[in-house]
Image (cartoon, helix red, strand yellow):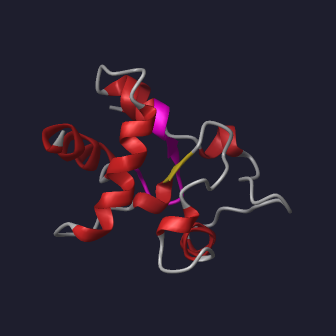
């Protein structure tokens, strides 16, 4: 499992500033399309590892900040993304999600 997490972290480190991807897109890129939840577990654990992993750039397939409760405060994830130029609607969904979406299968 830690090898899988290491692979996840390497992909997440490549997400450009101002862009986001989904748990499922990372899982599919790594050849495990049914492992989106495992990617989420990796993101939850990423705060305890060495080095910076931009976990705030990984959202659910609809552009919702489902991992926000695993940051220091529930607003941290949104604030980090807003600092990168992303905008949100009242439901905390990324506006123009498809335009901001980074698909590792297409981009790498």
Residue 90 coordinates in the image, percent (x, y): 86, 63
Estimate the x, y position of residue 56 in percent, counting from the top left: 48, 61
Position above or below: 57 against 76: above
- Place of residue 81 in the rendered image (x, y in percent of width and height, measured from the top left): 57, 66
Residue 50 image-quadrant placement = bottom left
The quadrant of the picture occupied by the C terminus is top left
Image check: 5 left or right of 42? left
The magenta region covers: 15-24
Q: Which of 49 and 95 is in front in this view?
A: 49
Q: In which quarter of the image is residue 51?
A: bottom left
Q: Name the main secondary structure of what is drawn in magenta.
A: loop
Drawn side of residue 81 relative to residue 14, left or right: right
Q: Is residue 68 magenta?
A: no
- Between 84 and 63, the one nearer to me in the picture: 63
Quadrant where the N terminus lies?
Answer: top left
* Left or right position of 22 against 38: right
Q: Is residue 42 shown above or below 28?
A: below
Residue at 42% from the left image edge and 46% from the top image edge? 40
Query: What's the residue at 55%, 80% (across, down)?
Result: 73
Compared with residue 40, is residue 82 higher up or lower down, i.e. above or below?
Answer: below
Q: Where is residue 24 in the image (x, y as percent from the top left)?
A: 48, 31
**Label tally:** 0
At horizontal 48% and vertical 72% (from top left) the residue drawn is 71
Tell me if I can see residue 101 in this picture. yes
Q: Can residue 104 be seen in this view?
A: no
């Amino acid at each position: 499992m830690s090898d899988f997490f290491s692979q996840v972290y390497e992909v997440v480190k490549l997400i450009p500033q101002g862009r986001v991807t989904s748990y499922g897109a990372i899982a599919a890129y790594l050849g495990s399309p049914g492992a989106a939840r495992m990617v989420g577990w990796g993101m939850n654990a990423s705060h305890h590892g060495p080095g910076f992993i931009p976990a705030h750039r990984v959202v659910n397939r609809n552009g919702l900040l489902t991992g926000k409760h695993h940051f220091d405060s529930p607003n941290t994830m949104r604030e980090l993304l807003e600092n990168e130029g992303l905008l949100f609607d009242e439901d905390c969904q990324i506006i123009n999600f498809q335009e901001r979406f980074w698909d590792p299968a297409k981009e790498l």
